[in-house]
Amino acid sequence: MDADKIILSKNIWTGNSQQSISGGVAIKDNKIVYVGFQSLDSFKGSHTEILDYGDKLVIPGIHDAHTHFLNAAVLNSGKIAVLYDTKSEQECVDRLIKLSEGDNLINGWLIGWGWYHLLWDNQTLPSKKSLDKAFPDTPVLVNSSDGHTVWTNSAGLKKLGITEDSKDPKGGFFDRDENGKLTGLLLEAANSWASGIVYKPDLNTAAAMIKNFAKVANSYGITAISDLSISAVPGSDLIFDDAYQKLLDSNDLTLRVNMFPTLQKGLKRGKEMRKKYTGSLLRISGLKQFFDGVSSTHTAYVSEPYSDADSLDDKGHLTTTVDDMRQMVFEATENHFSVRIHAIGDEAVTQALDIYQEAEKKYGKLPDVQYTIEHLENLKDSDIERLRDLNVIASCQPAHALIDTKGIENDLGPERIKMMWPFRQYLARGVRLAFGTDTPVVDINPYESIYNAVTRKPVTGGTAWQPQNSVSVTEALRAYTFGAYGPSCRQNELGSIEKGKLADIAVLDTNILNTTSDEILKTHSLMTMVDGKIVYTASKVGSHN
């Protein structure tokens, strides 16, 4: 068999061992047909393209296992005020004013993303008052960095149809002041409901934004994403599947996309998508639902009150009832859908595991159904064994651990933080681990997340935080490749460089397996291949026939 392409390198990391090998990877059509050295010449034909990368590191394509891709693509478009580094409410408003000077409205809204009040000089939540002063007529929607709170103005509330008499949506709430008046903050399900209405650019605009952001992802060696952009709007989500399909039809889809729409009773959206998207590049891979919120606003559900509790019973809350979640998981399992549950607080994790255990008892272990918990930022020691025994994947985002360590310590205290993002514990005790970013909560750059997981330091440097939970580079990389395909049940065809697997491969400009930790942060891809096709090159690749 003559290969279409052969990638040569002295450093090929297949994903199946700690060390890299010297040799080549032969590719025919969209599959790997040989990996090694001894028989490589037998795959060389007169039309075989030889890609010689010397000693550059060849790896399986990176899969970001948790993204909100349209949100991130919109953020990447330049039409959103980026607020991650702001130090005050007014600084956010000033950036929005500057943004408004151009043609930057999306669906009639001025949008910002990334504020985090606990990193401001004055750690007070913002309100509609400052936005009303600057934007009395233009609706404004500003997402917090964790994506769980929306800050809007009176014009925004009016356009959303929210009045002083509006009732809180199930699983969320419209924040009110001590006088019962709307503050302009929408939390949890109210946040996702509002975002689901606002983040709807037209099809051509959405496709162009996704295409551009996919190229950014490709530049890091990312070959696949899982899109978990769910919404509280019944029957809908923020997965713009029509835009993905448009790009696929025009041969412009440069990422393998695993879609996880909202898990809701009846499974209408999931069933429709499963019939429509059956290909290898674009498919529905399961369903996702929220079970709690986030620690920073005390909406993550914990078993004991927060250390800086606002009241004696300040333990957060579930965003849906246990009975409702059980019913949805049972229905999904019966219909052979994999399920991913967002659970950050330790009690939410326990309750999610209870439901998964009940579902397994009722339906057995189904080979095409995979249960996953997203984030698991804090959990009980005993639940680590339950994750392993129930074969539930821990889908984690290493960068989250280093966003605000002081805030985490204030929220949960010195004892509980020892079990925050315990990656080492997971691997040592046999738990399957998948890595991603949750972009746009953090940048999609996987090497920043790998650095975070390995050093337990923020990318800006500093002292390691809870370093006993760090992992090696190869362990982090495996969680970003083979491990990341676990939630979508695709480890048999993707995630490692092996004969018979699909040819999703990246060549890096830095050997991250053999370098200092700081150099990891400088890493980019020299070449990224998806389904046997080169979708990105940093510069002209030396090749010959």
Image (cartoon, grey):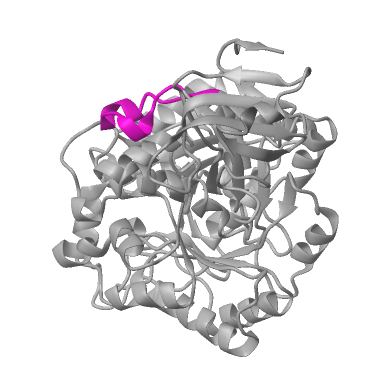
Percent position (x, y) of residue 176?
43, 60
Residue occupying the far bottom of the picture: 362
On screen, 52 above or below 166? above
Q: Is residue 254 visible?
A: no
Is 512 in the magenta? yes
Return the x and y of residue 50 as percentages of the image width and height.
65, 19
Name the side, left or right, on which 348 lies relative to 411.
Answer: right
Q: Which residues are magenta?
A: 509-526
Q: Is residue 465 magenta?
A: no
Residue under the image location 66 percent in, 37 percent down: 255
Please, is residue 296 above or below residue 372 in the view? above
Tell me the quadrant of the picture where the N terminus can be found: top right
Left-right relation of 54 to 45: left
The image position of residue 128, as x and y in percent, is: 45, 45
In terms of depth relative to the viewer, which is nearer, 135 or 195? Answer: 195
Q: Residue at x 67, y 30 (%)?
A: 209
In this view, 463 is above or below 343 = above
Identify which residue, 125 or 410, lies in the foreground. Answer: 410
